[in-house]
Amino acid sequence: MTATLIDGKAIAQELRASIAAATAALSKEHGIVPGLAVVLVGSDPASEVYVRSKSKAVTEAGMRSFDHKLPETASQAELIALIERLNADKSVHGILVQLPLPRHIDSTLVLNTIDPGKDVDGFHPVNAGRLATGQRALVPCTPFGCVIMAKKVHPSLSSLDAVVIGRSNIVGKPLAQLLLAENATVTVAHSRTKDLPAVCRRADLLFAAVGRPEMVRGDWIKPGATVIDVGINRVPGEGGKTKLVGDVAFAEAKGVAGAITPVPGGVGPMTIACVILNTLRAACAGAGLPEPKI
Ligand code: NDP
């Protein structure tokens, strides 16, 4: 058996086209052009690449992109002052602070300064609380993308057994909440979980968000299961270069799973698409409009 590949690039492309159509309708019918402000402190090359691809995706969707670059030496007070200006700016509907921030800055304090209505990363405790209590919320983009991909395979996740490996605030926990909201039966596994392979073998839907290259082996997977690999790990490749691998041993897993995401080309492109989806959702909610139909 060879698993069907869940093509994150193609699904993200399709999603971005629907977002662009809904954005055009929002601006035609209500005169609102969603705007996303991305704040980058310092010049980490990986962050710069990520910020550039976000800005490109935002403009392609017909939205406004506002990039703010601060030097590595910027103080916490300067960053907070910038966020407060963006909170008050009516042309900005989404604010995203690129992580990691330099060591001298308290990331939690900075993220908590963002207006929850503009928090397109969904990291603010108000949004985490709204998600946990089933209220309209801006939800973290990576888990949001994971659920969209899972629903491409199973239009209803109701009553499926889902196992999430990882319990971080940015992936594992919100993913578990989203799956619960879809009526899946959810198990959250982590570094202290007993007999992880046996736990994983129960899963109709297996999500790996660990950060350990190829930890999930083929024989941990229930035959026919859907496997979503969130992990992005750089390992030594051929010719002294590095290559990207996920948290799942892809070559083994694809012989057992029913459907699986590749790394790269799976969860990654969906995360960016969900950033622009959240910007559109924030613009609609801010204007008192219903959720956009995507
Ligand atoms: P964290 O390091 O914050 O969390 C990792 C989780 O994995 C923790 O809950 C930890 O458990 C658990 N874990 C660690 N070792 C084991 C183990 N041996 N067995 C079981 N569980 C274990 O990572 P993130 O959630 O931020 O990211 C996870 C992965 O996803 C990373 O590879 C990251 O690069 C990737 N990622 C990809 C994104 C994308 O766009 N595709 C976006 C965000 C992240 P415990 O809590 O007990 O320590």
Image: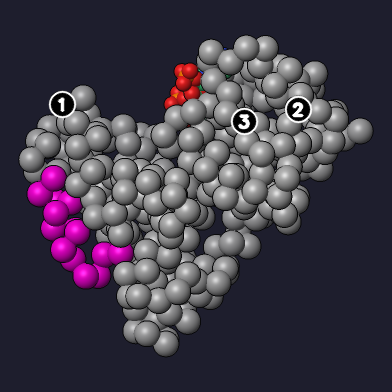
Residue in view at x 57 percent, y 34 percent: 230
Whether 102 is drawn above or below 275: the answer is above
Quarter of the image where the N terminus is located: top right
| Amino acid type indicated by mark 2 | Arg
Would you name the residue on which mark 3 appears? 187
Residue 265 in view, yes or no:
no
Would you name the residue on which mark 2 appears? 202
Query: Which marked residue is nearer to the observer: mark 3 or mark 1?
Result: 3
Q: What element carries label 3?
A: strand
Would you name the residue on which mark 1 appears? 104
Quadrant in the picture for residue 214: top right
Residue in view at x 43 percent, y 79 percent: 26
The alpha-carbon separation of the residues under discs 2 and 3 comes to 10 Å
* Left-right relation of 112 to 272: left
Q: How crowded is mark 2: few (under 14 residues within 10 Å), some or many (20 or more)?
A: some
Q: How crowded is mark 1: few (under 14 residues within 10 Å), some or many (20 or more)?
A: few
Q: Which residue lies furthest to the right in this view?
A: 1
In the image, 89 versus 198, the foreground residue is: 198
In the image, 75 versus 143, the foreground residue is: 143
User: Going from the N terminus, do you reach mark 2 or mark 1 first?
Assistant: 1
| Amino acid type indicated by mark 3 | Thr
- Residue span colored magenta: 80-93
Q: Where is residue 131 in the image (x, y as percent from the top left)?
A: 44, 49
Q: Is residue 64 magenta?
A: no
* Left-right relation of 162 to 189: right
Q: Which residue lies furthest to the front in this view?
A: 133
